[in-house]
Image (tube, rainbow, N blue to C red):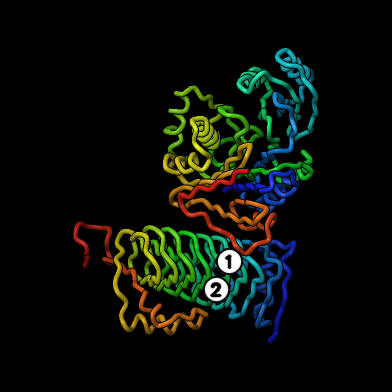
Amino acid sequence: MKELIIDAQNKTPREVNQAIKKSAKDYEKIIINNPNAMHYVAAGLTDPVEVVIDGSAGYFAGTMIHGARIHIKGNSGWFPADNMTDGELIIDGSAGDGVGQGIYGGTVVVTRDTGSRTGEIMKNGTIIIGGNSGFMSGLFMMGGRIIVLGDMAEDAGESIIRGVIFVKGKIESLGKNAKVEEIDHEDKKELNELLPAYGFELTPDEYEKFKKIVPQSKRPFYGTDSEDG
Amino acid sequence: MCGIAGVVFKDKKLHGVGKYMTKMLDALQHRGPDSAGFAIYGGLGLNENEYLLNIEVKETPGLLEQVKNRVNTITPIKNEEIIPSVENHIIYRCKIALNSFNELKHLIMDIDEINDVIVLNGSHSFEMIKDIGLVKEIAARYNTPDKQGTHAIGHTRFSTESIVDRYHAHPFQSYIIPDITVVHNGQITNYWKIRDPLERKGHIFETNNDTECIVHYIADKLSEGYKLEEALEQSVKDMDGPFSYIVGIPNGVGIAKDQLGLRPGVLAENDDVFAIASEEVALREVLDTHDIEQLSPGEARAYTI
């Protein structure tokens, strides 16, 4: 495998991203050393390259990527994978607010806890949270799926329009237009296929603990009569 | 946007807090280029009745002598230092003694009556350093990295609500109780609703800046017997808007975050250090840890020594 190491020490985010983009077509794997929680790392990367960030990233890590596979070996700040259309962003540690904000596709995985508004306005794609997910996760969610292996904080699924949030732990409270349903056989099968692929090995009993948050109505805000709820 | 940071050394001993806070704020420089400031606690070593004044004086012939005369008519200047700054101003620092803390605000108001002079602060247990410009420039100007202390708070400012000058640089201080400071990222949108009852109680506001409102609010609560964490928790209920702010007091620091979680706040600690900031990048300047805690919306935390 053709690998390149970029030392981010004393470089600006623009310089690091220029170096990544310049090399993305010629290398299969790019390793970023000394990221020191830098913002915007790998922003707008559209080549199907593997990027390993050897430490923590700041805000907007992997924003607007299409096809790149990014592995952050530390924590991430706010809005990792914001508006991603395709690809993969895996965070070994915790993350701040707005994980996977507005994604259209691809997969985001956070091994530990996240801040508020995970998956807000996401349209498609998958977000997996290994720990707890914060306040108003799934805010205005318009499609895709969020899987939370821990607990969900207040107002889960606030104003959710489409999509689904699978939760294994406790739901502190639901947001407007959100309701809880039991998962069915197809849901269990879907989770069983997805989670082990990202290192989450659950027992059959643990799969039974999942429930799902879905919208009450697809058009909840205008007019006096809701469509179906 | 603004960057905020706080650090406490748990052993209560003196450490290179000035150096650490300089690094933390430099890491947050991208959050605000207008001004920066530090409140470094525990290292001044003043006697019980002594205070340090930081006075901004325009470089005008005879003005500094006028300031010294004004101070000396009230209380003798014990020692003094002149720190050159930018935009035709100097910072005149002097040590004085007062009979009680209650005399401090009156002294400051007396000096403020002189045109082109403003007292940036007066303190007993912390050193205030705040100026316009970038963190590294200010740190070099005031020799900040050499300052020792037990804990500190700091700020990089992106101004949104009031003018850019030294006085409006954070930290802001209140004289309702001794030695309380605040740095803030955000806006208090029910500002007048918070300010009005404080003014009715007789508390004096010098600016229309919402950070000054926060520091008076917390000082008022502490004066009523609230513990720091209780005052912070009450502020989250009373204040509207997007905010996270850090309070410094003589024996610790605390942080509060708005109920919708619209401004960032992260925390990390180990056996030796408690650190809070806007971003992880600042925490990494004082702690080598993988465990970064995101403060929840409406959460308040404090650490006292």
Residue B48: x and y in percent read 70, 26
Q: Measured along the vertical axis of the image, is residue B65 above or below residue A190?
A: above
Q: Measured along the vertical axis of the image, is residue B128 above or below residue A136?
A: above
Q: Secondary structure at mark 2?
A: strand
Residue B90: x and y in percent read 76, 29
Residue B21: x and y in percent read 70, 47
Residue at mark 1: chain:
A
Tally of numbered discs: 2
Q: Which residue is mark 2?
A: A89
Left or right: residue A227 compared with residue A28: left
Snapshot quadrant of residue A206:
bottom left
- Between disc 1 and disc 2, whose residue precedes? 1
Q: Residue at x 76, y 22 (%)?
A: B60
Disc 1, disc 2: CB below 8 Å?
yes
Which sits in the foreground, A210 or B60? A210
Could you say which disc has been placed on residue A61 in the image? 1
State whether residue A30 appears in this view.
yes
Could you say which disc has been placed on residue A22 in the image? none
Q: Measured along the vertical axis of the image, is residue B9 above or below residue B70?
A: below
Left or right: residue A146 compared with residue B186: left
Whole-number angstrom distance, CA of label 1 to CA of label 2? 9 Å
**Callout 2: few (<14), some (14-19), or many (20+) C-alpha neighbours within 10 Å?**
many
Which sits in the foreground, A156 or B167? A156
Residue B4: x and y in percent read 61, 47
Q: What's the amino acid at mark 1?
A: Ala
Q: What's the amino acid at mark 2?
A: Leu
Residue at mark 2: chain:
A
Left or right: residue B89 compared with residue B217: right
State whether residue B185 appears in this view.
no
Q: Secondary structure at mark 1?
A: loop
